[in-house]
Image: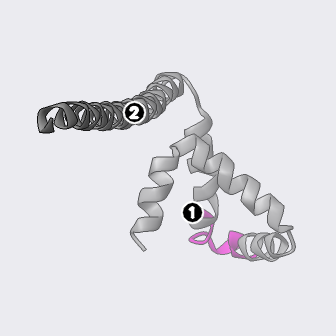
């Protein structure tokens, strides 16, 4: 009699354990799938950024854009050492004080794009 009662109870307990094990396995598989998807996204982002930087480096080899910015940004520094040009530099900076903020933001973005955002980040980290 006890055996007849224990049989269904044992079957019920076994079914419950199987269901719990299946649920845990499914949850573990879901977590693994999510982790793999996140890893693929991160790898894709890193690969895309590296590809973009490589393409930009290849294209800048035949471009004068970087050199142009260096020359333009160096002119006030050079002219400050020429006595006859001191007034030009001073008046030029006075005029730049009147320029709107969007101009400087645009200029900063253009220079950062020319020399690379990483270069800008390295420059600002030094301060």
Name which residue lies at 78% across and 69% down.
92
Secondary element type, mark 2: helix
| Residue 84: in magenta span | yes
| Residue 47: in magenta span | no
The front one of 37 and 65 is 37
Residue 41 percent across, percent down from the top left: 46, 32
The front one of 125 and 99 is 125
Dividing the image into 4 quarters, which one contains the N terminus? Answer: top left
Residue 2 percent across, percent down from the top left: 13, 39
Classify 33 as above or below 78. Answer: above
Q: Which residue is mark 1?
A: 78
Name which residue lies at 29% across and 34% down.
12
Q: Which stretch appears magenta?
A: 78-87
Secondary element type, mark 1: helix
Q: Which residue is mark 2?
A: 30
Residue 36 percent across, percent down from the top left: 36, 30
* Nearest to N terminus: mark 1 or mark 2: 2
Q: Are marks 1 and 2 in contact (CB under 8 Å)?
A: no
Q: How is the image coloured?
A: one colour
Marks 1/2: CA–CA distance: 64 Å
Classify 75 as above or below 25. Answer: below
């Amino acid at each position: 009699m006890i055996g007849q009662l224990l049989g269904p109870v044992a079957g019920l307990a076994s079914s419950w354990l199987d269901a719990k094990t299946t649920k845990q396995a499914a949850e573990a598989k879901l977590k693994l799938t999510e982790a793999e998807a996140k890893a693929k996204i991160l790898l894709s982002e890193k690969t895309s950024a590296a590809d973009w930087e490589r393409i930009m480096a290849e294209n800048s080899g035949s471009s004068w854009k970087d050199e142009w910015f260096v020359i333009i940004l160096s002119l006030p520094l050079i002219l400050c050492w020429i006595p006859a040009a001191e007034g030009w530099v001073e008046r030029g900076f006075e005029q730049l004080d009147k320029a709107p903020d969007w101009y400087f933001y645009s200029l900063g973005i253009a220079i950062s794009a020319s020399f690379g955002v990483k270069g800008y980040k390295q420059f600002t980290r030094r301060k």
